[in-house]
């Protein structure tokens, strides 16, 4: 198999995250308090999130934000991740395009999610938090958060979407290996979960229900903070490490992308690879096309409405300005567990609204066919 990999030396590694909010032609609309419907302050958010994450969430002025040294130290365990020229895939497709993929699976947790789990747990620990809680779909975020919590000496509680827990049982085993407690959502351990089960005893869960349960736990447990693996601005900020590395790796390859494509659930993976390149479209007049690939079964970018909506099913979270299918949307039991979320991140939503990027929705069987082709040509079995 013919491949060409580009890796950065330690001295070339980014030491700052890129905050695209500072460069956006139109800033995202402010998130609203679920009770007062007034714009949120970071103090409002700090009731459930680590304070530093709240400040990053609402920071629309600072283009570059320093990565704390303890987080950089953990990044160096697995970063940089490879940028690979996929010659065999190009040959199989019969395309003149040069196809590169950024392989975020080379870290111990197997996905990009740990890039944000580490700083979120670090910031929580710094302010004296003892417990963190979160939701997870397929389980990649839950695994990453469980690992990061153990690294910084925190207790973790994870609510995993019930259908995904049944489809992917080993993911919850990974979380428990790192010391986390894991509940299938909806569960009977929270008021939000009980309400869902009362209305629909056979409910197999959604990310909206799991978020409701995790937020409720954070609000009712002293010393507990809620962490989120996608959607919010500070998560996309942390994931910009992907695109900043990719930018330098493309320079090593002597190329610059005409298209940047990534899968889309809430936006952290897509934003992580896209935003550092997007800044050159905004500031330097580059013409790169940005394409977010989402499941046809959960098509918020292509068929959702741009409006304020809750991030969870019970309406406990702030109201976010985003493309959404409605916070009570219950997706089909598709295998792309992390991509079953009803809404899109605020930054991506605004950029799509402004015509600077766009989404495509793809049927599950076509996804499987593409994944098998990629596996047979590049030797890596990708997630759906």
Image (cartoon, rainbow, N blue to C red):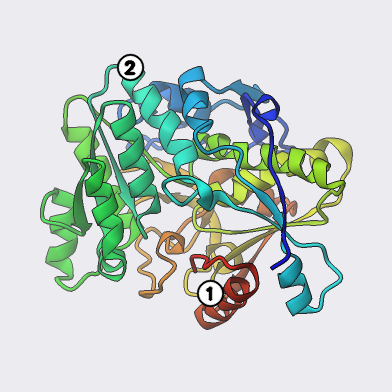
Residue 273: x, y in percent?
Answer: 65, 47
Quadrant in which the N terminus is drawn? bottom right
Q: Is mark 2 on a helix, strand or loop?
A: loop
**Which mark is on residue 376?**
none
Q: Is residue 364 left or right of residue 138?
A: right
Residue 40: x, y in percent?
Answer: 44, 30
Q: Mark 1 points at which residue?
A: 296
Residue 320: x, y in percent?
Answer: 47, 45
Residue 170: x, y in percent?
Answer: 28, 61
Q: In this view, does 362 lie to the left or right of 117?
A: right
Q: What element carries label 1?
A: loop
Find the distance from the CA under tag 2 to the CA under tag 1: 41 Å
Position of residue 377 relative to residue 144, above or below, is below
Asked if residue 216 shows in the view, the reply is yes
Q: Which residue is depicted at the point 47% across and 46% down?
A: 230
**Which mark is on residue 127?**
2
Q: Count neighbours of disc 2 (C-alpha within 10 A) and say few if under 14, some if 14 to 19, many if 20 or more.
A: few
Between 82 and 323, the one nearer to me in the picture: 82
Q: Count neighbours of disc 1 (C-alpha within 10 A) and say few if under 14, some if 14 to 19, many if 20 or more.
A: some
Position of residue 172 relative to residue 166, above or below, is above
User: What is the number of callouts on the image?
Assistant: 2
Disc 2 or 1, which lies upstream in sequence?
2
Q: In which quarter of the image is residue 193?
A: bottom left
Q: Which residue is depicted at the point 87% across and 70% down?
A: 96
Nearest-to-viewer mark from 2 and 1: 2
């Amino acid at each position: 198999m013919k491949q060409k990999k580009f890796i950065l030396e330690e001295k070339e590694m980014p030491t700052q995250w890129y905050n695209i909010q500072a460069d956006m032609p139109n800033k995202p609309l402010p998130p609203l308090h679920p009770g007062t419907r007034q714009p949120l302050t970071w103090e409002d958010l700090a009731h459930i999130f680590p304070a530093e994450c709240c400040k990053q969430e609402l920071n629309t002025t600072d283009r570059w934000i320093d990565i704390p040294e303890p987080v950089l130290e953990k990044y160096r365990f697995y970063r940089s991740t490879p940028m690979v020229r996929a010659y065999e895939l190009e040959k199989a497709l019969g395309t003149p395009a040069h196809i590169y993929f950024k392989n975020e699976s080379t870290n111990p947790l197997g996905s990009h999610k740990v890039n944000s789990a580490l700083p979120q747990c670090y910031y929580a620990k710094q302010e004296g938090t003892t417990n963190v809680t979160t939701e997870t779909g397929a389980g990649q975020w839950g695994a990453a958060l469980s690992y990061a919590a153990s690294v910084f000496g925190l207790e973790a509680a994870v609510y995993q979407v019930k259908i995904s827990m049944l489809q992917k049982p080993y993911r919850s085993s990974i979380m428990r290996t790192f010391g986390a407690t894991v509940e299938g959502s909806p569960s009977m351990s929270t008021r939000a979960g009980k309400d869902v089960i009362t209305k629909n005893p056979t409910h197999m869960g959604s990310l909206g229900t799991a978020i409701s349960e995790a937020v409720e736990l954070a609000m009712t447990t002293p010393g507990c903070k809620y962490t989120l693996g996608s959607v919010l601005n500070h998560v996309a900020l942390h994931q910009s490490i992907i695109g900043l590395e990719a930018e330098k790796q493309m320079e090593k390859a002597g190329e610059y992308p005409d298209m940047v494509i990534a899968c889309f659930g809430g936006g952290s993976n897509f934003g992580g690879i896209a935003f550092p390149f997007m800044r050159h479209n905004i500031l330097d007049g580059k013409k790169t096309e940005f394409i977010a690939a989402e499941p046809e079964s959960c098509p918020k970018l292509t068929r959702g409405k741009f409006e304020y909506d809750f991030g969870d099913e019970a309406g406990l979270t702030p109201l976010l300005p985003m493309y959404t299918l409605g916070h009570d949307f219950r997706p089909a039991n598709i295998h792309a567990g992390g991509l079953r979320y009803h809404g899109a991140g605020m930054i991506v939503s605004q950029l799509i609204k402004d015509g600077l990027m766009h989404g495509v929705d793809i049927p599950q069987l076509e996804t499987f066919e593409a994944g098998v082709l990629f596996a047979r040509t590049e030797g890596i079995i990708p997630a759906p």
